[in-house]
């Protein structure tokens, strides 16, 4: 109840204060090709089913029909203005409307396309117990997701090999630890990460450690070493005898 009240209040104030910026961005996107500045797409909802997530369109109109769900930083579908709004997370601000409606929360597992949810293991399906969020620990750790996928011939495959397993583990770690203090901390770290990702990660790691993250997850979350393929949560990791 407290979380929902906090979400609603912050979403209302956020949309009200950001309205001038939202209008300017919407007009700028519309002027580049005279197409809708909004991108509305189905995402997996809490408890199953779908909801319509709204954000600013950062790609060419109809880009979602290409069949590629993951977006690399060098994706040719991203527009010039789109690169700017993605870099500063401006495209995500409109999701405050989904928070206001109750489809999303400020903090929670990032909303996933249905194709990715269909790949979930039984353990990952626990993520559907929470409202999807605008940010979470994985949003901070993988704020450079587009750069990670840049140059890949199959961004979706690479995403499922080296990003999704860790994102899911971070989101599962958050389950059961959803509280107002933790949510406020993650929101502040997300904002800090826009300006200095290293600083945000340095402050995030002690939080994850306090939540009981294992050494492997902490090492990955520090982003000081290359990401490697790893099985998703719920899949047994086989080791050599």
Image (cartoon, helix red, strand yellow):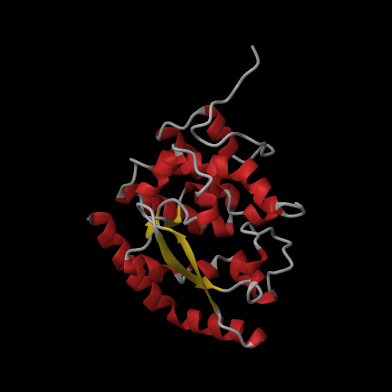
Of 112 and 193, nearer the camera is 112
Which picture quadrant has residue 126?
Answer: top left
Of 129 and 150, nearer the camera is 129
Which residue is rendered at x = 38% and y = 53% of the image? 48
Tell me: 136 left or right of 219: left
Whole-percent x, y for residue 47 in the image: 35, 52
Which residue is rendered at x = 41% and y = 34% of the image? 210
Q: Single out the residue that lies furthest toward the left.
A: 1
Tell me: 193 left or right of 152: left
Which picture quadrant has residue 195?
Answer: bottom right
Whole-percent x, y for residue 233 in the image: 50, 35
Whole-percent x, y for residue 39 in the image: 53, 73
Tell me: 93 left or right of 75: left
Which picture quadrant has residue 71?
Answer: bottom right
Q: How many marks?
A: 0
Tell me: 189 left or right of 220: left
Q: Is residue 153 above or below residue 19?
A: above
Whole-percent x, y for residue 150 in the image: 73, 55
Which residue is rendered at x = 72% and y = 63% of the image? 75
Q: Please state, as top left, top right, bottom left or bottom right, where the C terminus lies in the image.
A: top right
Q: Is residue 94 above or below residue 224?
A: below
Q: Please state, as top left, top right, bottom left or bottom right, where the N terminus lies in the image.
A: bottom left
Of 182 and 127, nearer the camera is 127
Which residue is rendered at x = 67% and y = 47% of the image? 157
């Amino acid at each position: 109840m407290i979380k929902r009240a906090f979400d609603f209040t912050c979403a209302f104030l956020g949309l009200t204060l950001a309205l001038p910026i939202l209008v300017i961005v919407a007009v700028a996107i519309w002027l580049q090709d005279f197409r809708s500045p909004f991108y509305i797409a189905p995402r997996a909802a809490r408890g199953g089913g779908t909801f319509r997530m709204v954000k600013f369109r950062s790609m060419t109109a109809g880009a979602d029909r290409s069949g590629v769900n993951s977006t690399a930083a060098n994706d040719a579908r991203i527009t010039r203005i789109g690169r700017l709004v993605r870099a500063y997370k401006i495209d995500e601000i409109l999701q405050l409307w989904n928070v206001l409606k109750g489809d999303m929360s400020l903090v929670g597992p990032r909303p996933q396309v249905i194709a990715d949810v269909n790949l979930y293991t039984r353990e990952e399906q626990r993520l559907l117990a929470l409202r999807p969020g605008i940010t979470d620990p994985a949003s901070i750790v993988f704020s450079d997701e587009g750069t990670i996928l840049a140059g890949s011939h199959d961004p979706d495959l690479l995403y499922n090999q080296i990003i999704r397993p860790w994102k899911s583990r971070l989101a599962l770690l958050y389950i059961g630890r959803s509280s107002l203090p933790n949510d406020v901390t993650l929101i502040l770290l997300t904002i800090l990460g826009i300006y200095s990702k290293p600083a945000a990660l340095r402050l995030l790691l002690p939080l994850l450690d306090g939540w009981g993250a294992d050494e492997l997850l902490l090492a990955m979350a520090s982003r000081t070493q290359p990401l490697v393929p790893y099985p998703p949560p719920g899949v047994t990791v086989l080791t050599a005898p």
